[in-house]
Amino acid sequence: MKAVLQDKYGPSEVLELRDIEKPAPGPGQVLLRVRAAGVDQGAWHLMTGLPHLTRLGFGFLKPSTSVRGREVAGVVESVGEGVSRWQPGDEVYGTCEGSFAEYVCAKEGKLALKPASLTFEQAAAAAISGVTALQAVRDAGQVAAGQRVLILGAGGGVGSFAVQLAKAAGADVTGVCSAAKAELVLSLGADRVIDYMREEPTAAGGQYDVVLDTAGNRPLRALRRILAPRGTLVIVGGEGGGQIGGGFDRALRAAALNPFVRHNLKALISVEKGTDLEALAAMIDAGQVAPVVDSVYPLARARAAMDHLRSGRVAGKVVLSI
């Protein structure tokens, strides 16, 4: 089968399309015929090994898992021992290790039925980014009706979901993005958009009940300045920062500061759960949320897809069609 592999950390040039052996599902696993794979920021971090903190658990000198990709949508080909939830022919989406391939094995609990209203490409775009946004809005931010919510990076993979989820919760939503993405963010339900090239969103006084930061390039003091007295800041992921800790240093500082301030400072590292995939699928099929797919590349152009992901021009998600 065809798969995109890497033998060392580095830029997109380390990715190579090769023929490798088709995997077989072990106990508790299913074999998927991959139809689409999401290209998320986590795939870039695991490709480059940056920040270095990323390498913990994934190989310090070189990747322990050579096939890239973690978001997947496809069809169950076969099931391993002890699997009763899935059967061949089921259309599913979720997470795994090595989705940039024609076939991949996934744990049965990391999958859910693909939303009936979505294509495989759209479903792959939702597997990690959608669940991350759900956990940020519903769990960490506890967004409620009538609250004022600011979403930094509103035009990105996680941000585009977060805008829709916050609106579905009944919040008044302000999205921060580039002018090129403003129309998209408004179409997703944002009540207003701030173009960060023309206006610094953290310049105003405390006014937001919840701030979701998916961009990772503003200091804690600036983000706290725009929070209401009892407001909540949710730092999503580890973007920004240096080569060693990346944006995770802000998460650590937020955790250390939180007991001593009135604000509620939280750092979200999303947990991949089948139950959240199911909850997200239900909202998608109900018309409350929809994935935004910026572009679709064939598997052979995984390098170009990864470069486009980091170009700063992506509105929503980049996806590989397989």
Image (cartoon, rainbow, N blue to C red):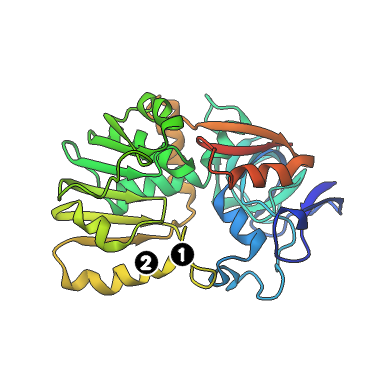
Give coordinates of residue 263: x percent, y percent: 18, 61
Residue drawn at the location 31% of the way across and 55% of the way down = 234
Vertical arrangement, residue 202 with respect to residue 188, above or below: below
**Quarter of the image holding residue 177?**
top left
If you read the primary sequence from the N terminus, does the residue marked by circle 2 or circle 1 appear first?
A: 1
Residue drawn at the location 15% of the way across and 46% of the way down = 207
Residue drawn at the location 42% of the way across and 37% of the way down = 178
Residue drawn at the location 48% of the way across and 66% of the way down = 246
**Image disc number at residue 250:** 2
Q: Report how far apart the C-alphas of labels 2 and 1 lie in the structure.
A: 8 Å
Residue 235 seen from this side: yes
**Image disc number at residue 241:** 1
Vertical arrangement, residue 86 with respect to residue 321, above or below: below
Q: Are marks 2 and 1 in contact (CB under 8 Å)?
A: yes
The number of numbered discs placed on residues in the rendered structure image is: 2
What amino acid type is highlighted by mark number 2? Answer: Arg
Near-viewer residue (152 or 172): 152
Residue 77 seen from this side: no
Give coordinates of residue 168: x percent, y percent: 30, 32
Near-viewer residue (137 or 32): 137
